[in-house]
Image: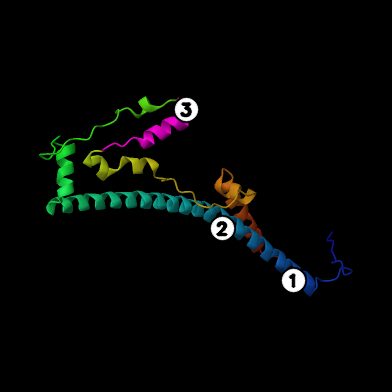
Amino acid sequence: MVQSYQANTNAEPPGQADAVIRGALGWLFILVGCTAIAAAALIPAYFETLDVKQARETEAIKAQMLADEQQRYIDFHQALIDDDPVLIERLAMTELRLKPVGTEVARQAATDPLAMVIEPTPVAIQRAIASQSQMHSIENELSRPDLKQKAVIDVHLERPRQTRLIIAATGEYRPLLAGLGALLVLMGLWPRRAAA
């Protein structure tokens, strides 16, 4: 016994508006999926670029400090070649403990600046240390460890604020975001049946 089935003729065939909506829905899936994949791929790379830029600017500050130190050594070498009398006298005083004939060494104050502090407060101690005149060695003048201690090497760049998308794209959910994006693209590209 063969049964025959007849299509329901009461249903209207899909119109042009239905086709446009189906096409737009497919493109929407593709765009959202591509955005998710791009976020999972590009946002971590952007943050790595910011890290590299920050490290480069930090190294540029260190390189400038080394260039300044090199210039001090070059100037010192040139003064030695030119037989600068002030430098020669200073080297004799600080390194060889020699003084020019016919001169006397000025009487120095106490070597400990804290011996002059009346009140043991941090402000008074800092003032006493700052007022103490000390003759540094030539090496100290050339390398300038005081400048190195005061130098601000940490560079902070402006970074985007942490949104849910950035947290998802850079955290442990990054593979899930990329997989969801691929699934949405696949859904957008999935072939649809043509209306009969």
Extent of the magenta region: 120-135
Q: How crowded is mark 2: few (under 14 residues within 10 Å), some or many (20 or more)?
A: some
User: Image check: 110 left or right of 153?
Assistant: left
Q: Is residue 167 magenta-colored?
A: no
Q: Which of 119 and 53 is in front in this view?
A: 119
Q: How crowded is mark 3: few (under 14 residues within 10 Å), some or many (20 or more)?
A: few
Alpha carbons under labels 2 and 1: distance apart? 27 Å
Residue beneath label 3, please? 121
| Residues at circles 3 and 2 in contact by the CB criterion of under 8 Å | no
Residue beneath label 1, please? 20
**Image disc number at residue 38:** 2
- Prevalent SS, magenta region: helix
Residue furthest toward the left?
101
Q: How crowded is mark 1: few (under 14 residues within 10 Å), some or many (20 or more)?
A: few
In the rendered image, is residue 195 in sight? no
Residue at image point 22% right, 35% down: 106
User: Image check: 156 left or right of 6?
Assistant: left
Q: Is residue 134 magenta-colored?
A: yes
The type of residue carrying mark 2 is Ala
Q: Nearer the viewer, residue 106 or 142?
A: 106
As helix, strand or loop, the secondary structure at mark 3 comes to loop
The type of residue carrying mark 1 is Val
Question: Which x, y percent locates residue 93?
Answer: 17, 38
User: Which quadrant is home to the C terminus?
Assistant: bottom right
User: Which quadrant is home to the N terminus?
Assistant: bottom right
